[in-house]
Amino acid sequence: MSRHDLFICSVGVVSPAGTGVERLVAALADPAWEPTVGLDRPDGPPLPVAVCHDFSPRNVLSPMVARRLDRPAKLLAVAAREALAAIGDPLPWDRTQVGITSGTWNAGTSALVDVLRAVFLTSPEEAPPAQFPSTVANAPASQLGILERLGGPNLTFAEKQASGLRAVIEGGRLLTHGRAAAILACGVDEADWLNAEGYARLGVLADAPGHTGMRMGEGAAVLILAPEPIGVPLARLAGWASSGTASEPWLYPDCPDALIDASRRALENAERAPTDVDLVLSLANGIPYLGGLELAALAEVFGDHRPAALSTNERLGEAGFASILRVAVAALVVAGRARPAWTPAPHLAAMGFPPVASQPRTALVTAVAGGGSSLAVVLTAV
């Protein structure tokens, strides 16, 4: 099986734009759209986090199921139900051969805090037993596998901002090696005040209008990957690559070499030239240094070529799931399902990268994580 045989058959999304793909598409089409921003904390003003303020599992999950799931697992289950509904029931694959690859930055944080609060402030006997299974990062993907009776490989990746894109790449690898009949590639993160407080104290959040820094986000995205087109697939997962530069775990790499290498090899694997790319999903998140890395890499990869650029993180929020959300957006745009009206990030616009003006046929999606990971995938029209 070649990499050219992989298809993105459907997408499910819960994001700060709302529950469902159509809410995301509507937000992308509105140039003035902004999310609800503000996550309450116990001892200070709200934190700059784009939250899924109207999210509810009602009408998607039964009350009994919803009661046993924490917020990340609910977000992921609802997004997965949308993606699976687009495929139809029964599924065209044996459920025991359908796998899950998931990426997250902070799943399990809230449950872990609840358990540790009880342990340290009262006694271990007071720790809530129902919360304990949710204290690990792989709980949402595991709960999803149980809920949907999916018996294939079930893997979770915690690779900071690149987690979601890693789930896509590893899902593709499982399919090319014949380890699964189909894969639900996922990403999920929750809005947790303690997690956001840590970044606020480091001074990396955009804590006031006009301030540089990250806006964090929460949500879930699910892509169903398969080696054959089911129904009308959104896009082809044509190529991918990953690379790395040694750096401290909390720092971005000090040069763009790994991002350049990942982008070039992803294009080579997709049998596409840089000039074939007509859409770039920006990894910009409001931190100027990361924007500079991206700009240097794009200049090296594309030369004078200027594909359209779309920036989503600075509105929908930065998180582990954000990188797979960019893949979902790219697939929707390549398929003609979404017509974004958002302008590129300022550093890209200043260098001549235009907004999306027509339906693209080839998209490049990248991610860089603290610690040096650099990933890239290429999507093409079916």
Image: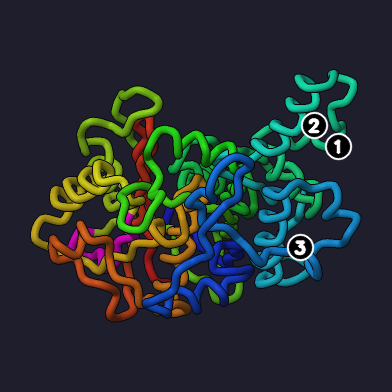
C-alpha gap between disc 1 and disc 2:
6 Å
**Residue 128, position in %: x, y?**
85, 32
- Which three-letter amino acid code belongs to the residue tagged 2? Phe
Picture quadrant where residue 373 is located? top left
Secondary structure of the residue carrying numbered label 2:
helix
Q: What label sits on residue 57 in the rendered view?
A: 3
Span of residues in magenta: 273-282
* Image disc number at residue 130: 1
Pointer 2: what residue?
132
State left or right for residue 97 relative to residue 7: right
Residue 56 position in % (x across, y down): 73, 64
- Secondary structure under badge 3? loop
Q: Locate residue 198, reporting x and y percent.
A: 50, 34
Residue occupying the point 31% across, 24% down: 247
Q: Are marks 1 and 2 in contact (CB under 8 Å)?
A: yes
Residue at 65 percent across and 61 percent down: it is 79
The residue that appears at 28% across and 43% down in the rendered structure is 290
Which residue is at a point 55% across and 48% down the rendered structure image? 175
Contact, mark 2 vs mark 3 (Cβ under 8 Å) = no
User: Was residue 272 drawn as part of the magenta stretch in this picture?
Assistant: no
